[in-house]
Image (cartoon, rainbow, N blue to C red):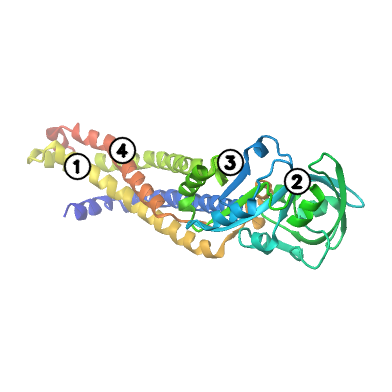
Amino acid sequence: MLLQIAWKNIWRNKVRSAVILTAIALGIFAGVFNMAFYYGMVEQRIETAISTEVSHLQIHQKKYLIDPDSKNSIANATALALDISRLPAVKHTSNRTLVNAMISSAESGSGVRLVGIHPEDEKRITDIHNRVVEGSYLEGVNRNPILIGEKLAQQLNIKNRSKLVVTLQNTEGEMMYASFRVTGIYRTTNPAYDEITAFVRSTDLETLAGIPPNHAHEIAIFLNNSTTLDATMSALQMQRPDLEVQSWRELMPEVGLVEESMDVSMYVFMGIILFALLFGIINTMLMAVLERRKELGMLMAIGMNKKKIFGMITFETMVLSLTGGVAGILIGGALTLYLSHQGIDLTHWGWAAAYESMGYDTMVYPILKSHMLIRITLMVLLTGFLGSLYPAYKALKLNPADAIRIDI
């Protein structure tokens, strides 16, 4: 009954109510869609960081983190990686040798990080093999194949099958030179990564840099589920306290920081929208109260106490806010669900270069989270309650005798 009365009271002035409901719906729609868009963008960046660049966890020699010298490698890395792969939470592991080197073409040169990999193991832990845009994944060349990023290829002005010269320092401190043949060019969503990272076979790099067999600078670990990350990390730290176990959040702190601040920044954004709508709600309800002064005076005169008057005004305001809020959530949710399959191509909006420079994909798939919708609904109800306080206060200050004599 109370809901029905409140609904009728809201629509006494159809134009005014329609305007404020539209404003609330549009504001909530903008907030919901904006949150879904940025959640999708950040989730994609995290997914790329894990599946392409660093994996869920990495293990290094503690000395290597202080001094990334090729001598500071993990002994018996093959056996260790095999033991780790037997853990229930672990899906795959891959050993890597890492060496900083100079890579040169006939026209130019650049500093790179050579990543020595076992190609088949790396396929199970990263998607670099699926990101090859030209050539193949370390295949088709028997001696010293190399896979380079598109950005690096442009800098060196080379194409697939080109010859490169790699210069590096071996474990004895001697300068070593070797020619490599480009078998493929890859492209990720992070041009900065593509520009400095080149992949070679681990056996070729070990021979060139003088790294002992079964040694590795890095063991990358890919988990079955991200929810087990902290527990698996703690277990490995207890198992091998002599080694440094790091999660992707520590390896890429800039991405971890974005993830941590995402909720706060999005709710601040939604709070700003609701704060602006609050004044519209107050104005609408205050007008409604002033128009109904005689009616409210009569209700007080026949015995309705102030608590019920306050409750009636508050309930009407919250119904008004919730109606507009739910409409905005439904519109924003419907558009988000549609675009979560279709995607939003930022190249059509001229923002591609800016987002690519920060490592974000230019095709964004918005993500709608249930907890986000619940919290937005609660924020809308709170806004409605706050918006009702001043109009309700004005209603309670009415003198029944004076209000009844008002000629409307």
The residue shown at (62%, 50%) is 219
User: Which amino acid does the dot numbered 1 rest on?
Assistant: Gly
**Which residue type carries mark 2?**
Val
Element at badge 1? helix
Residue corresponding to mark 4: 386
The answer to whether mark 1 and mark 2 are in CB contact below 8 A is no
At numbered mark 3, what does the secondary structure look like: helix, strand or loop? strand
Q: Which residue is mark 1?
A: 311
Q: Residue at x 24, y 50 (%)?
A: 9
Q: Residues within 10 Å of mark 3 (few under 14, many from 20)?
A: some
Q: Nearer the viewer, residue 1 or 118?
A: 118
The residue labelled by disc 2 is 99
Distance CA(mark 4)–CA(mark 2): 61 Å
Which secondary structure, mark 2? strand
Task: Tell me which amino acid carries mark 4.
Answer: Leu
Q: What residue would you read off at disc 3?
A: 244
Q: Secondary structure at mark 4?
A: helix
- State how far apart marks 1 and 2 are (Cα): 71 Å
Q: Which sits earlier in the primary sequence, circle 2 or circle 3? A: 2
Q: Tell me if I can see residue 109 in this picture.
A: yes
In the rendering, at what x and y percent does residue 359 appear?
Answer: 65, 49
